[in-house]
Amino acid sequence: MSDVYDNGELASLTSAALAGDAQALNTLLARVRPRVFRYVLARVADKASAEDVTQEVAMTMVTALPRYVDTGRPVIAWVFGIARHKLSETRRADVRRHETTVEQVPERGCMNAAGD
């Protein structure tokens, strides 16, 4: 499928989804999801994280669609913009979340035994 055809199809699906066509919204999500997944997977550590971010992008598309304004740019540019923002959010959250790998989780009683 050529990019020109794809852009036209995505624009048509977006217009129909904006008009309330649920099937058009489902088709739009199905068309962009593989491209978003590949984009995200190239930028995150693992497939599970890429799936999570891709789902976040899809949910944001659905909630942001009523505010979508056709500026003449391809719809996929709007979608990749959402993906870029979701990747940034994920990276910020990962930095804030401090995780330590341990071989064995200490028993709760062991921690209190020293103080008792």
Image: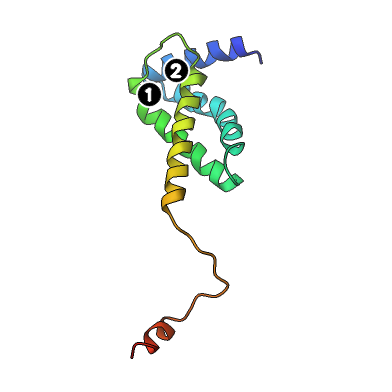
Where's residue 114, x and y in %? 39, 88
- Neighbours of disc 2 within 10 Å: few (<14), some (14-19), many (20+): many
Seen as rendered, the residue at the extreme right is 1
Front-lying residue, 25 or 39: 39
Q: In this view, does 42 lie to the left or right of 12?
A: right
Who's the residue at 58% across and 72% down the image? 103
Front-lying residue, 92 or 50: 92
Q: Is residue 50 above or below residue 14?
A: below
Q: Distance between the residues labelled 1 and 2?
A: 8 Å
The answer to whether one can see residue 23 in this image is: no
Question: Mark 2 is on which residue type?
Answer: Thr
Q: In this view, does 25 lie above or below 98?
A: above
Who's the residue at 56% across and 25% down the image? 31
Q: Mark 1 points at which residue?
A: 65
Question: Mark 1 is on which residue type?
Answer: Leu
Sequence-first tag of 1 and 2: 2
Q: Is residue 40 above or below residue 76?
A: below
Where's residue 48, x and y in %? 57, 47
- Neighbours of disc 1 within 10 Å: few (<14), some (14-19), many (20+): some
SS class, disc 2? helix
Front-lying residue, 22 or 66: 66
Q: Tell how many labels.
A: 2
Tell me whether circle 1 and circle 2 mark residues in contact (CB < 8 Å): yes
Seen as rendered, the residue at the extreme bottom is 116
Q: Mark 2 points at which residue?
A: 14
Q: Where's the C terminus, which quadrant?
A: bottom left
SS class, disc 1? helix
Where's residue 88, x and y in %? 45, 37
The answer to whether one can see residue 49 in this image is: yes
